[in-house]
Amino acid sequence: MKIISKYYGSILIIGRSNAGKSTLLNTLIGEKISIISHKINTTNSNIIGIYNKNSYQIEYIDTPGNIFYNNKILNSLKNNKYNYIFFILDRNRWNYIEKKFVKILNKITIPIILIINKIDQINNKNILLPYINFLKKKINFISLFMISAKYKLYTNDINNFICKKLPKKKHHYPSNYITNQTKEFIFKEIIRESIIKYLHKELPYLINIKVNYIKKLKNLLNKINIFLLVKNINQKKIIIGKNGIKIKLIKSRSKKNIEKFLKKKINLNLWIKIK
Ligand SMILES: Nc1nc2c(ncn2[C@@H]2O[C@H](COP(=O)(O)OP(=O)(O)OP(=O)(O)O)[C@@H](O)[C@H]2O)c(=O)[nH]1
Ligand SMILES: [Mg+2]
């Protein structure tokens, strides 16, 4: 019997908030598992996406933009838990935030892969060569990709490149897994994404979301009950919006995206409760 070798590796994706880390994770996996928005601090915990192809398996870990005070992530970097690090740059944006990342990265031994994202938004491509020369002086990286995570430009190259660089190792997840998050967690994240989209300022970060997922028998629709727990009546009124418009938008967008994720219709109920 022929024994097929397996290859496995783990990659941490870091970079400033809004650089497109979650967008890239979703593109690499080919499914939306990490939420995205144009506002900052969208991702608030590590999200794992798993890429499977034949004998290769890659664990991609999406992080929140602000990792500077996150001891768990900082320590994991020191402990060489990852095979590679993707440092995502938002076009040629380089200021004190990137400098803070470089300070951390220059202290560790994990190989770094630089990714310049949103190249679809760089009209003057002449800036790229000097920028790359500048980056070479700032940071020690083994490879560089220029991509558009949103429009899936050159993103396939990344998976192919990493597959070739993976060590021979047993797979960590079953081959049909795309994430290790529970369905309830993903539903919660989808709802949070809609809340961030339709509500302003800090309110989305104050709402506590509870999900109750009830699987029904064959012919009946699975039911998802969602509770948005808020502190006071004012917060409740803001979420409901004038004539209930906000809550309707949050509900219909969440339902649509959960159905897209599950690839089936659901019955979704949403309640706002004051704690
Ligand atoms: N034009 C363009 N927009 C992009 C690209 N990649 C991501 N975006 C947009 O950039 C914004 C931020 O994307 P996210 O993926 O949420 O960024 P993030 O780095 O995960 O942000 P945090 O979770 O807050 O750390 C969203 O509006 C995306 O649609 C790209 O390649 N091109
Ligand atoms: Mg994110």
Image (cartoon, rainbow, N blue to C red):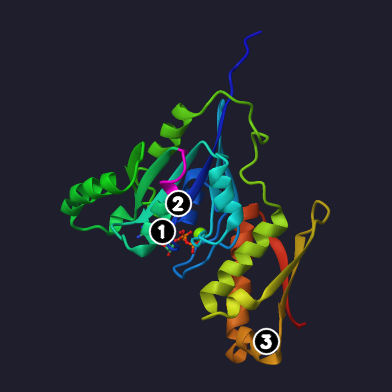
Where's the C terminus, which quadrant? bottom right
* Residue tagged 2: 104
The magenta span reads: 105-110
Pointer 3 or 1: first along the chain: 1
The residue positioned farthest toward the front in the image shown: 107
Give, as a three-letter code, the residue at label 1.
Lys
Q: Nearer the viewer, residue 214 or 92?
A: 92
Q: Is residue 106 magenta?
A: yes
Percent x, y for residue 112? 41, 41
Q: Is residue 244 above or below residue 263?
A: below
Q: CA distance from mark 2 to mark 3?
A: 41 Å
Which residue is the extreme one toward the top? Answer: 1
Which residue bears the numbered disc 3? 236
Let me know if residue 234 is in the magenta part.
no
Q: Amino acid at mark 2?
A: Ile
Circles 2 and 1: CB distance less than 8 Å?
A: yes
Image location (x, y in percent) of residue 29: 52, 44
Q: Residue at x 35, y 37 (%)?
A: 143
CA distance separating discs 3 and 1: 38 Å
- Name the residue that disc number 1 marks: 100
Pointers 2 and 3 in contact (C-beta within 8 Å): no
Which residue is drawn at the image coordinates 26% and 46% (left, top)? Answer: 137
Say what amino acid the circle numbered 3 marks: Lys
SS of the residue at dot 3? helix
In the image, 97 versus 32, the foreground residue is 97
Task: Note whether ligand 1 is within 8 Å of mark 2.
Answer: no
Residue closest to the eye, 6 or 194: 6
Q: Position of residue 20 (x, y in %)?
A: 43, 57
**Predominant SS of the magenta segment:** loop
Towards the viewer: 154 or 12: 12
The image shows residue 234 at horizontal and vertical percentages of: 65, 91
Counting labels gives: 3
